[in-house]
Image (cartoon, coloured by chain):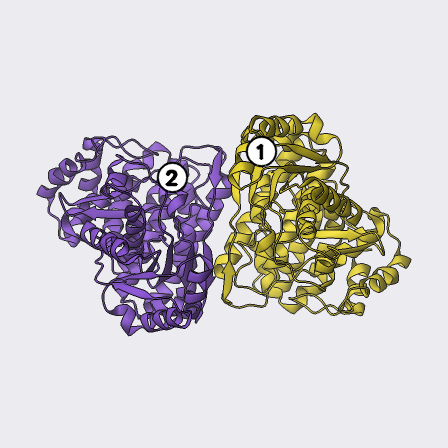
Chain colours: A purple, B yellow
Amino acid sequence: MNNFVFYAPTWFSFGRGEGKNVGALVRRFGGTKVLLVYGGGSVKKNGAFDTVTASLAQAGIPCLELGGVQPNPRSGKVYEGIDIVRREGVDFLLALGGGSTIDTAKAIGMGALYDGDFWDFFTGAAPIERTLPVGTVLTISAAGSEGSDSCVITHEKGDLKWGCPKTDVIRPKFSVLDPAYTCSLPPYQTACGAVDMIAHICERYFSNTPDVALTDRLAEALIKTVLDAAPKALADPNDYAARADLMWTGMLAHNNSCGVGRDQDWASHQIEHELSSLYDCAHGAGLAVIMPAWMTFVTDHDPLRMAQFAVRVLGCEMDFAHPERTAREGVARLRDIFRAWGMPVTLGELGTKAQDIPTLVEHRRKKPDGGFPFGGYVKIGPEEMAAILRLAE
Amino acid sequence: MNNFVFYAPTWFSFGRGEGKNVGALVRRFGGTKVLLVYGGGSVKKNGAFDTVTASLAQAGIPCLELGGVQPNPRSGKVYEGIDIVRREGVDFLLALGGGSTIDTAKAIGMGALYDGDFWDFFTGAAPIERTLPVGTVLTISAAGSEGSDSCVITHEKGDLKWGCPKTDVIRPKFSVLDPAYTCSLPPYQTACGAVDMIAHICERYFSNTPDVALTDRLAEALIKTVLDAAPKALADPNDYAARADLMWTGMLAHNNSCGVGRDQDWASHQIEHELSSLYDCAHGAGLAVIMPAWMTFVTDHDPLRMAQFAVRVLGCEMDFAHPERTAREGVARLRDIFRAWGMPVTLGELGTKAQDIPTLVEHRRKKPDGGFPFGGYVKIGPEEMAAILRLAE
């Protein structure tokens, strides 16, 4: 186990009806004038918008609005939000939605207190030292941004989908998690969210760090919960218990509680970011294609680790004479599960063509550090990235 | 799953050598004058005391000392600490040791800002609204007080071992966890700590709340880690990986991450507190006696839950025709494990006599609420408490 710091000081209010406490929570964490950031109309249909604005009004907190955040959130909304915050003297950002909305609010929070371009934080030109406080009301279980130290934005100039460096500074002050808000999610989005959670855990699970028995088991507990709850939520969208399991697992999957003390990978996310920045596919759908391909590519690196994943998480029977067979069976089972959830599992199903592979690899080179190699478990250069994409064909 | 709030804003620095950062952490959390609370001489032998005081000196933070805290910490040290804090203008409490030391620091922190008797917080006569900040440097993996919202003190008038109401206000600001400090722990204390961790998880695990699949799995992951790591630490006290697993598990076992959204039990702890307040036995040793007896007593309440514990945690094979047999086999295995670790598993081995049982039950009645019934899983009245104690004979 490596040395580590863990500091996750977000207040979580979890459960049906908790949205009514938003006004009091904003007050508790020092907000006096709020910018409410949200996406499309779904929050107006599922009751979340009305509950939140009523709670703010009751607490006497003035509220401006910034709607229209899109999936794979774009820099334009961030600049727009920074302008409003500065012009109107907003001192608290309240995100109402999923990861795209929360990440937009986080980026506005960083940029509003910085004289330069907020994108400097994403290129590495400036360190993130402070931010306006952010609170969240979650309506999509997936990204884990409601408790995380990370933020991903796509810059419109060049379609660059990059994350800023992880820092506890940008963890939300509070997050309200009402599973009932997620019952209106369409099946495709529910499945995308479940895949994203599994990816967040796997990016941490596949590690070369020795002596990580505890975080291995915590990670396995989280993935098994997703595998158990996701099909229930797909079969019955109003299954509150399944929605609740997914919602709290999504937070734990990305607040780093199962990633402490171990080197992490993040190669599948890096490859997927190229896919969704160029083709604007859903992040979870891109991960459903890339992750099993990546697992196939890295199986030989440590067949016993992949076999552990296959046995403990996917219930495969261990072939002690041929652990690599167990490992490969696990990867196949995971791909089958994603397919059963209605997810694409090949680039073709995602709408990408074989001839796009060189484009994806080249686009990766635009990163300030040249983009290669990446991946903490197995180092991925341009050839390896192309090989993984071919395995996903 | 029940609605819940989870708010655990403690900073954790984990790993070998992290003690050197204590001075900077005290500064970060606003301390300018420290009272260093510790127990016997062990922290002077294992290097922790020297590292911590050197770090404080380097940060220019003056430091007063309050040593001599005993296991089952007593009110006398709390009053002594409150006097020092007030007289000397201390603004930060730094606990160096295990749960007894940390709980003493927490109680001093509450009492120092309160005009009345700190014991009012434990009788329920006053609510805990604020406290001086507390930091910890942990040297015993057991109580979990380094990340918890709880505090237990024994009042010398009447030997009352009571906990204050749980509140996030008293969670430490930071905790430094260096597993190397625990390598000098004697085997008996190592085993007591492991039992205490398992108890903290089981008190949450045995619940009547439906739909708690996620926290069940997290709890099982933690207990399996203790069962794996404790014998390694007993076989080789310098096994850093095992010590690290125990240290982080001990924190997670009691920061309530595996207890959110579910009713909890705490009957075994309540009964053990009577044992250790009257006979001054080690808390973990008392729990090793009480917990299997309590499990035997409650098995029929929900044989399938106990069977789940037996199968998933203790590796028993499920007897689908007779789940209660699996349940009882699990309890027997847990008792065998405690015995193999050198723990007492009967009241006799603890030095208690059968004729003490009525005394223990009567002593419980001194609680402000009359002491009965207690227990969230199965309600325990005086007769049930006596029956559990007889099962422990």
- The residue pinned by badge 1 equals B178
Where is B119 relative to B137, above or below? Answer: below
Q: Position of residue B219 (x, y in %)?
A: 55, 53
Residue B118's quadrant in the figure? bottom right
The residue at the point 23 percent across, 69 percent down is: A41
Q: Are marks 2 and 1 in contact (CB under 8 Å)?
A: no
The residue at the point 64 percent across, 37 percent down is: B34
Numbered disc 1: secondary structure: loop
Q: Which amino acid, mark 1?
A: Asp
Q: Which residue extends farthest left?
A: A355
- The residue pinned by badge 2 equals A206
Q: Chain of mark 2?
A: A
Disc 2 to disc 1, C-alpha distance: 25 Å
Say whether residue B287 is left or right of residue B210. right
Q: Position of residue A133 (x, y in %)?
A: 38, 52
Say whether residue B94 is left or right of residue A366. right
Please tell me how crowded label 1 is: few (under 14), some (14-19), or many (20+) other residues with Cα within 10 Å: many
Q: Which quarter of the rendered picture does the C terminus of chain B lie within?
A: bottom right
Nearer-the-camera pick, B268 or B115: B115
Q: Is residue A36 visible?
A: yes
Q: Position of residue B374 (x, y in %)?
A: 71, 67
- Mark 2 and mark 1 on one chain: no
